[in-house]
Image: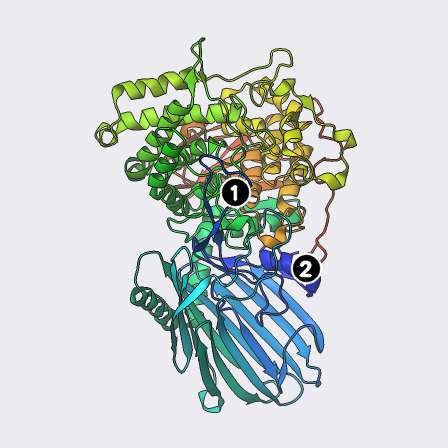
Amino acid sequence: MDSWRLVEPTLDIDLLAQTESLFALSNGHIGLRGNLDEGEPHSLPGTYLNSLYELRPLPYAEAGYGYPESGQSVINVTNGKLIRLLVDDEPFDVRYGELHRHERTLDFRDGVLRRDLEWTSPAGQRVRVCSTRMVSFVQRSIVAIQYEVTPVDAPARIVLQSELVANEQLPPPGNDPRLAALMEAPLEPEETYPNHTGVLLVHRTRHSALRMASMMEHIWDGDDDVLVTTDAHPDAGSVTLSTTLEPGQRFRLVKLIGYGWSSQRSRPAVRSQVMAAVTAAKHSGWDGLLAEQRRYLDEFWARADVRLDGDERMQQAIRFSLFHVLQAGARAEQRAIPAKGLTGSGYDGHTFWDTETFLLPVLTYTAPQAAKDSLRWRHSTLDLARERATQLGHTGATFPWRTIRGQECSGYWPAGTAAYHINADVSDAVLRYVNATEDLDFERDYGLEILVETARMWISLGHFDAAGRFRIDGVTGPDEYSALADNNVYTNLMAQRNLRGAARVAKAYPDKAGEFSVTGAELDQWSRAAESMYVPFDERLGVHPQATGFTDHERWDFDNTPKEKYPLLLNYPYGDIYRSQVIKQADLVLALHLRGDYFTPEQKARNFAYYEALTVRDSSLSACTQAVIAAEIGHMRLAQDYLREVALTDLDDLHHNTGSGLHMANLAGVWLGLVAGFGGMRDHDGALTFAPRLPAGWTRLKFGMTFRGRQLRVDISPSEASYKLQDGEPLTLRHHGQKVTARVGKAVRHPIPPVLTPAPVHQPPGRPPLTGNPVFPWSNA
C-alpha cells in the first residue's frame, strides 16, 4: 500500500475497462484513458478534448413542445498515445509470448503514469520496456511519453512505430443508457503534414463543425544508428524508428503530442497553435516537462493535501480522488467539467449539476482558479440559458440539466428539464466562490449577471399562493425517483438562497445591476419571495416531506425487491417509482447539508432517520452526503461506512460502470466526507465553521484549505482540534460554536466535546452501506 501511488502489480486483461479509467491522465483540457502504449488489447480507446463534441439526433416516439432536437456527445479524437514495438519482427503484444512482469503506477505527486515490464517474444527474445506518460498541467496542449526498450539476454533488432490515428474503431456501447452513443468516424480530414520526425493532422467534426489539430514530434538517442521513416495519410500518420541493440543497451524515445481545437479559428490558426505548443515543449525537453509537472503538483498538495492516520487504504483513496478531481478541472479554462471528467465517454461527456454541487466546493477551497474558470464557463452560456427560459415560458435564464456546449441535451424532460434546481446550484457555487475568495471583480463582472437571471427565473416559475407563501410547483429535485413534485424542499431552500444572494449583490453594484435593468421593485419582489418561501412540514411525522405530499405516498416494497433488480431505473417503470416513497439519491438530506442553517439539530436527526430508511443509493452522488450528515448527527460508524463506499466506488468498481469513466462528483465526495463530514466544515453565508469529530480507529485527520487568500491548516485528533494559518492576516472562524482566531505561527487548540449517541437508523433491506474492506482483484490491500 502506497499512499502516494496507485499500483497495479500484475496485468489482468479482464480488468482493462476499469484500469483504463483508473489510470487515466488529464489536465482538464486533454484526457487520455490508461490504454496500453501499443494500443491493444483494449476495452475502450479514449483520447478526449474538453468540449469537443459531435451532434447527434434525439429521436422521440412522440415529440413534445420544448424537447431538444439534438444531443451532444464527446468523441474519441486523434489518438497519439500509440507506440508499437517489434522485437526481431515479432510485435509486442501482452497476449502472446511470455509476460514475466508487468507493473503500472499512477503517481499522484509526479503526475505521471509509469509502466515497467519484461516480456519474452514467441521467438524467445527477452526485452525490458519502461514507459512514462504525462499530460502536462503547465503546458496545457501537451502530452509527453518517454518509451525505453532494453534487450535482456541477446542482441535484438528493435522497431518502434509511433502513430497518430483518427477515427479509431470503438466497441459497441452496450445496453446501459448511461454509456455514450456510438458514432462512426466523426472526424473529417482537412490537412496532413508529415516531416522527418513527426506528423500533423487537421480534422473537423462532420456536424458540429469543430476543428481540431494534433501533432506528434520525436526525440531519440543514437541518431547515427537509427533508421527513421515517416508516413502520413488523412486519418493516420506514423514515424518508424529501427535500430539494433546489444544486451543491456537502452534505446530511449521521447514522443511529444500537441492538441488544439476551436469552433471559430481557421485551419492555419489551429495548425499554428499546435505547432507552436509542440515547439515549446521540445524546448523544455523531457526533464523540463517532468520538473514543471512536479512543481505544479507540489504547490497543489501543499495547500490541499488531506492526511488520515488509522486507515491506510482510505489515505490512498483520498489522494487518488483529489488527484482526479484536480485533473478534471485544473486547465479546463472556461469549458465544462464533465461528470466523468476526461476519463471516459460515459454520460456522453455531459456536465450536470454535479459540477457546481460536488466538484466546485472542493476546487473552491483547493484550486480556486479552476472553480472560477468553471463558473465563467457557465456565464458564457447565459445567452443559451436565456433562450431556453424563453422557450419554456420563463424570464431570466434556465440552465440545462445536461450539456457540453450549453444547450439542453436531455431527452427525458421529467427528470431533465424539470430539474430547475440546477439554476440554484449554479448560483450557490457563485456565492460560495465569492465568499471564499473575496473575488469582487468576478462577483461584479460575472456573478451578478448569473444571480440576476436565475433569480428572475424563480420569480417566473413560482407564485404566491392565497396564504402569501411563495410556492415552486411541478419540479424534479435531486432525487430522480420523484418527478414533477410541488415544493421540493431542497429546490425551495436553494432558490431562497439564490434570491437573497441576487438581491444582496445587486444592491452592492447598483450601476452594474442597472445594466441588466434591475429595478427596486424587482429587488423587493426577490426579497419577498425569499422570506415567504414555502417549506412543507409533516406535523404528524415531525419531518419535512421531500416535497408536498411525499410522506403520504405508499412506501416502496423493499422486502420483495431482489438485489439484482437494483438500480431500480433499469428494472421498473418510472411510474411505479415516482408514485412511491423510494429515493435514488440524497435530496432532503442534501438540503440538511447545503442549507443546514435552516434546520434545527432535532429536525436534522429526525429527517435523517426518516430518509435513511428510503434511500437506495442507485446513484454515486448519495453516499457522500449521507456520510456528511451521519457524522454531523453523531452516527460515526455509519458515516465511516458511507465514506468507505464513496472512496471505493471507482477503485473497487462498486457500480460496475467504472469502465466508462470515473465518477467525478463521487470522487469529490471523498473530500466532502472528510472535511465537511468528520471535519464538520460549513460555509453558510460565507462564515467558516468547524465541528470536528473522529470515528473509532482514526488517530488524526489533517487537511489544508484556501480561504480568503490564506492557507488554513486544520489538525484533528480524537480529543482536540487545532487551527493555524500558513500566511496572511488573522482569520476568525468557529469551532463547535466557539469563536476562534487562527493566526500565523502557533496553532490555536480547542477540545472536542463528546458526541451524544443518537437513536439508531436503518437502511432499506439489502441496501446498507459498504462495510468491511472489499478488495479490487489487483489492488494493494
Location of residue 462 in the rendering, given as x and y in whole percent from the top left corner? 43, 21
Camera-near label (2 vs 1) is 2
285 or 309, which is in the foreground? Answer: 285
Location of residue 452 in the rendering, given as x and y in whole percent from the top left corner? 33, 30
Q: Amino acid at mark 2?
A: Leu
Q: Quadrant of residue 432?
A: top left
> Which label number is shown at residue 683?
none
Location of residue 354 in the rendering, given as x and y in whole percent from the top left corner? 51, 40
Give the left or right position of residue 736, taking residue 376 as reference.
right
Tell me which residue sits at (55%, 55%) in the image.
344
Residue found farthest to the front: 62
272 or 313, which is in the foreground? Answer: 272
Q: Disc 2 marks which residue?
A: 15
Q: Quadrant of residue 19?
A: bottom right
Vertical relation: 407 (above or below) 499 = below
Vertical relation: 516 (above or below) 383 = above
Q: Is residue 440 visible in this depiction of the protein?
A: yes
Q: Disc 1 marks which residue?
A: 703
Colouring mode (rainbow / by chain / secondary structure / one colour): rainbow
**Real-space Cα distance between discs 2 and 1?**
33 Å
CB within 8 Å, label 2 to label 1: no
Circle 1 — which element? strand
Sequence-wise, the earlier of marks 2 and 1 is 2
Location of residue 675 in the rendering, given as x and y in whole percent from the top left corner? 54, 38
Tell me which residue sits at (58%, 59%) in the image.
23
Vertical relation: 628 (above or below) 38 = above
Mark 2 closeness class: few <14, some 14–19, many ≥20 residues within 10 Å? some
Of the 4 image quadrants, the one containing the N terminus is bottom right
